[in-house]
Amino acid sequence: MEKSAKEKGTVYNEAKIYQIALFSLNNAATNLYLALMGYASYYANSIAGFSVVLISFLLTALNVFDGVTDPIAGFLLDRAKGKHGKFRPYMLWGNVIMAGSTLLLFGTLEYIPKPFRIIYFIVVYALFVIGYTLQTVVGKSAQAVITNNPAKRPLSTCFDSVFIMAAYGGSILLAANYLVPKYGGYTNVKLYHEYALWVIVLSALCTAGAIIGIWNKDRAENYRRHKKQKIRVRDYLEIIKNNKPIDMLILAACSNKFAATVYGHTTVGVMLYGILMQNYGIAGLIGVITAVPTLIVVAAGIKVAQRMGQKKALVLFTYFGIVFQVVMIVALLQDSINTVNFGLHKINAISIAFFVVYVLLNGCKSITNNMVVPMIADCSDYEQYRSGKFVPGLMGALFSFVDKVFAALGTAFVGLVMLAIGYNSRFPQIEDTLTPVLKWTTIFLFCIVPIIGWVISLLSMHFYSLDMKTMKEIAKKLGDTEGEKKK
């Protein structure tokens, strides 16, 4: 493992930039599937005949099951001997299982007799969840072995933002601007067949790149000094009780995750772009035309994190996010919002205003959503400093468990809101007429829920102690301890 002496004798576990970048493709691989599964509700409703209430309940229950599998995966990961690496086997098999279950889910459900479709859906989706857990637990825990340099760790936020935006933005672009026009909407089963194949191929390529990125870090010889440590189930309770930073980070991240699940829900996108703005093509186009400006905002956030620490960067851009979200509410309330267009000959004042606000808001969302991942590694270092135990799997799994539970609650919340406004047999469609109820429901889900989530995040960060100064002290202490062990 590469080492470098820096900053008053502190020894860091260094990483090349390309290693950090390639490993970030692991998050892109899983987010491609996450974007696809965002359409599972439409598929189950339109193709399999499940009601809105039923599919919302099933997806919520299965997402909770997804969270439950994380502690198990993290526990097994930390106990693994690492003969072929601790993380690479999880990434490989997780992706293979997701590919197989996706083919079964989107390629065979409509052929199953109706009395057995619910059971079949549950079994196949549960299989997908297992694969998804195996690969996502790596994304939440392996940052601890990539690097502990406070100046380099925030770079993963930048690459995660780039690749996740590409995964989500590309998925929406594919669906809204290619698949929907080609197949006539979400009621054509062929749309889901082609979408699934795109995701399987692209995710496999991303996984291959991520495995290459972590290859030299994820070797058996790098884990020899931890072989004698004993990891027990009760370590979860001990960490929850004594590691306050991870508790506060989980609270902040989960409030963000709940909000992100709500405003990023496929149904909310249909309501916002297809019904309120009356131009669903924008849903795919907006991600492309705002990509570079958004990355400039993200780059500014990374500079702040490198100079002031990840905690201060997260807090600062959370404040900015709240401000820009309020401005977005004002924009969406304009009568001319349905004239937003990004064609060269059709652009107008409201289009420019929406573009600017969207860029600033999306940049803040990217920072606040992705900054927490390298901060988990900070909490993992703190745990090693506090208790002497190297447990990145437990730390990542503990975080991921609560994260996914809140994502499940976000999915259920959208379903309940749809039920409350009268959509009990089908989801909103792009051809639906805009009503005052739909307008205010869209604003509530897309704007107000994120503001509430960010306020909770700010309150929890007030009690989060791992600032840049503290992390430098921890890195120095861990480096000194490792040096003594080698003598």
Image: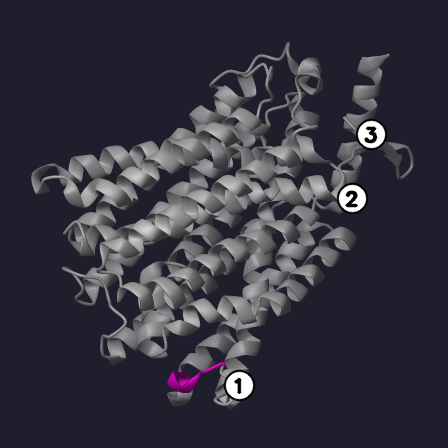
Dividing the picture into quadrants, the one containing residue 206 is top right
Q: Is residue 154 visible to the viewer in this orientation of the structure?
A: yes
Label 3 is placed on what type of residue? Lys
Queried whether the magenta region covers residue 417, the answer comes back as no
Q: Which mark is residue 344?
A: 1
Horizontal and vertical percent position of residue 461: 59, 50
> How many angstroms separate mark 1 from mark 2 (CA)?
49 Å
Label 1, residues with CA under 10 Å away: few <14, some 14-19, many ≥20: few
> How many angstroms separate mark 2 from mark 3 (CA)?
21 Å
Horizontal and vertical percent position of residue 251: 50, 46
- Could you say whether the residue bearing mark 3 is in a helix, strand or loop? strand
- Could you say whether the residue bearing mark 2 is in a helix, strand or loop? helix
Label 3, residues with CA under 10 Å away: few <14, some 14-19, many ≥20: few
Q: Residue furthest right?
A: 8
Q: As displayed, is residue 211 above or below residue 486?
A: below
Q: As displayed, is residue 155 above or below residue 247?
A: below
**Circle nearer the N terminus (1, 2):** 1
Label 2 is placed on what type of residue? Lys
Q: Is residue 247 visible to the viewer in this orientation of the structure?
A: no
Foreground disc of the pair 1, 2: 1
Q: Which mark is residue 445?
A: none
Q: Which mark is residue 3?
A: 3
**Circle nearer the N terminus (1, 3):** 3
Q: Nearer the viewer, residue 111 or 232?
A: 111
Magenta residues span 337-342
Q: Nearer the viewer, residue 472 or 16?
A: 16
The N terminus lies in quadrant? top right
| Residue placed under numbered mark 2 in the picture | 469
